[in-house]
Amino acid sequence: MDILTKIKQANLVGRGGASFPTALKWEAVKQADSLAKYVVINAAEGEPGVKKDGYILEHYADRVVDGARLAVEYLGATRCYLFINPKYYEVYRPRIMKAVKAAKLEKKFGFFVKPHQAGYIGGEETAILNALEGKKIEPRLKPPFPTINGLWDEPTLINNVETLYNVSLVDKGEFHNERFYTINGAVKKKGVYAFPADWTIEKVLRQSGNYPNFPFFVQVGGDASGDVLNQKQLKVPASGAASITVYDFKKHDSAKLLRYWLKFFQAESCGQCTPCREGTYRLNRILEKKKVDWKMFQAILTDLSETSFCALGASVPVPIWSYFKNILNNKNVSL
């Protein structure tokens, strides 16, 4: 049985956040008509609150490299690049290279350290391609998708660290549809945990010993772009990159939290499109005023979700709208 069939039977989906069926992406690259194909491992991990990729590289670098080897062999790829967070490169490079040698992948493997100026958007798959090609690090218009026109316009498979870790497990018959959860915030046992992918947020918190005994709410999928949920909304699986950050309802500062999100997005905007570049700037300026124009604030959030070029701008309203709706019950926050 070939690896694609195994992946299909396992119903494996990507763990980078989008949950796209892994087999469909592999198949698209395989079927693309080209003599040169590439594999890119995304280890950028720039979303605040998400630490699973670093944990995997620390403990299971051999599995990640094995998954990459399977991809290279299945696709007949010319080269495999590991696009890696600079902190991870410094710490985990020796064990990654050891795994590369064991997999006999040295001739086709190369590191590409995420440039400092790449920022948050540098982890977006088409921005990674631009970085590898030496171009301005900003998202590309899709379609065409990287599976057809990727690195140097050739078909390219871009998979997250955890996805390739799971591919290795699938190949060995050891995959049990688990995923890694990063648990942060007002909890006693912060860290990265492996639990079934279909467990609810509540069950993950309880089984990890992190369910609070005080009123709280959570942000799921990342401390910047993740959804904010109240205690009654935790009977659903964790979305996105499966991070869970717990906030003490009584001790948290609403104004500080809003400003944190908006300052982060303003600082990390690549500036390519006007809605994101100007929108995040204007939202921050509105919050600085003594009397907040909430009507204008909400109008800009709507524009960001509807007109931004890439996912960064469209993500700005996600934590804010969900915080207003689920935590503040649509009441305006007092600044």
Image (cartoon, rainbow, N blue to C red):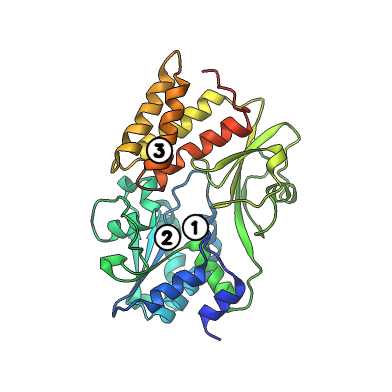
CA distance separating discs 3 and 2:
26 Å
Please tell me how crowded label 1 is: few (under 14), some (14-19), or many (20+) other residues with Cα within 10 Å: many
Residue picked out by circle 1: 16
Residue 281: percent from left, percent from top = 35, 30
Q: Earlier in the sequence, mark 3 or mark 2?
A: 2
What residue sits 31% from the left and 43% below the top? 270
Residue picked out by circle 2: 42
In the rendered structure, find residue 158 and report the number of the disc placed on it: none
Hey, which quadrant is residue 184 in on the image? top right
Of badges 2 and 1, the one in the foreground is 1
Eyeballing the image, is 146 above or below 5?
above
Instruction: Give yes or no for contact between labels 1 and 3 (Cβ–Cβ under 8 Å).
Output: no
Query: Residue 111 or 255: which is nearer the viewer?
Result: 255
Label 3 sits on a secondary structure element that is helix
Position of residue 174 in the picture relative to residue 297 (left or right)? right
Instruction: Give yes or no for contact between labels 2 and 1 (Cβ–Cβ under 8 Å).
Output: yes
Eyeballing the image, is 96 above or below 213?
below
Three-letter code, disc 2: Asn
Three-letter code, disc 3: Leu
CA distance separating discs 2 and 1:
8 Å
Please tell me how crowded label 3 is: few (under 14), some (14-19), or many (20+) other residues with Cα within 10 Å: many
The N terminus - image quarter: bottom right
Residue 299: percent from left, percent from top = 43, 29
CA distance separating discs 1 and 3:
23 Å
